[in-house]
Image (tube, rainbow, N blue to C red):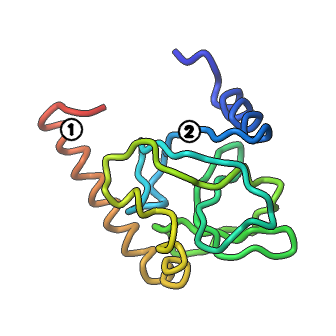
């Protein structure tokens, strides 16, 4: 049993970010496949609005959950993002809901994770309408294969 609820844990991480600290956050979804996968651990650092650049992966609050999606553009205090494995751009996010930016990968089973930030981001924001559905489909297949392997060979967690 965890000593914190998810809300308490995220509040604690947010407080550390407000004090300029970098935090490590586990990935729980597949929307950033093939670069980030469930159970990867990413490093998140604080960021100011003026330092935002298209292609960065922002971590933001949506419906009491933290989401990591790639920044498409920012304007008038809002950020427009999309998961690499998603076709559609997310609803506009007020910058006040941005918790930080991905600055590193602490742990991953995927070789592509180390490429999730940097130059590739600018390419992915231009190709997302095509690459998003392809990545989503490949992610679902990969996840099912991984689950099957865990059941059959009784490995992993």
Residue 138 position in % (x across, y down): 31, 66
Residue visible at 64% across and 53% down?
59
Label 2: state its secondary structure.
strand
Residue visible at 46% across and 67% down?
85
| Image quarter hosting the C terminus | top left
Residue 10 position in % (x across, y down): 68, 35
Q: Which residue is mark 2?
A: 24
Label 1: state its secondary structure.
helix
Q: Are marks 1 and 2 in contact (CB under 8 Å)?
A: no
Chain-order first, disc 1 or disc 2: 2
Q: Residue furthest left?
A: 153
Judge by depth and name the residue closer to the eye, 149 or 58: 58
On screen, residue 129 above or below 10: below
Residue 41 position in % (x across, y down): 47, 42
> In terms of image quadrants, where is residue 82?
bottom right
Comparing labels 1 and 2, the label whose residue is closer to the camera: 2
Residue visible at 27% across and 60% down?
141
Mark 1 Cα-neighbour bin, 10 Å: few <14, some 14–19, many ≥20 = few
Q: Which mark is residue 150?
A: 1
Residue visible at 49% across and 81% down?
123
Viewed as shown, does residue 51 lie left or right of 57? right
On screen, residue 44 above or below 151: below
> In terms of image quadrants, where is residue 51?
bottom right
Q: Which mark is residue 97?
A: none
Viewed as shown, does residue 92 lie left or right of 131? right
Residue 1 position in % (x across, y down): 52, 15
Q: How many marks?
A: 2
Judge by depth and name the residue closer to the eye, 121 or 153: 121
Mark 2 Cα-neighbour bin, 10 Å: few <14, some 14–19, many ≥20 = some
Viewed as shown, does residue 102 lie left or right of 152? right
Viewed as shown, does residue 41 lie left or right of 157? right
Q: CA distance from mark 1 to mark 2?
A: 26 Å
């Amino acid at each position: 049993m965890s000593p914190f609820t998810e809300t308490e844990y995220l509040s604690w991480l947010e407080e550390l970010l407000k004090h300029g600290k970098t935090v490590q956050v586990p990935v729980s979804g597949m929307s950033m496949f093939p670069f980030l996968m469930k159970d990867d651990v990413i490093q998140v650092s604080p960021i100011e609005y003026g330092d935002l650049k298209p292609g960065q992966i922002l971590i933001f609050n949506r419906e009491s959950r933290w989401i990591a999606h790639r920044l498409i553009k920012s304007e008038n205090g809002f950020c427009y993002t999309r998961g690499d494995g998603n076709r559609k751009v997310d609803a506009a996010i007020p910058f006040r809901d941005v918790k930080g930016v991905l600055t590193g990968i602490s742990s991953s089973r995927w070789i592509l994770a180390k490429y999730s930030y940097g130059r590739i981001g600018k390419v992915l924001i231009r190709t997302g309408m095509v690459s998003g559905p392809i990545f989503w489909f490949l992610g679902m297949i990969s996840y099912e294969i991984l689950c099957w392997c865990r059941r059959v060979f009784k490995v992993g967690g």
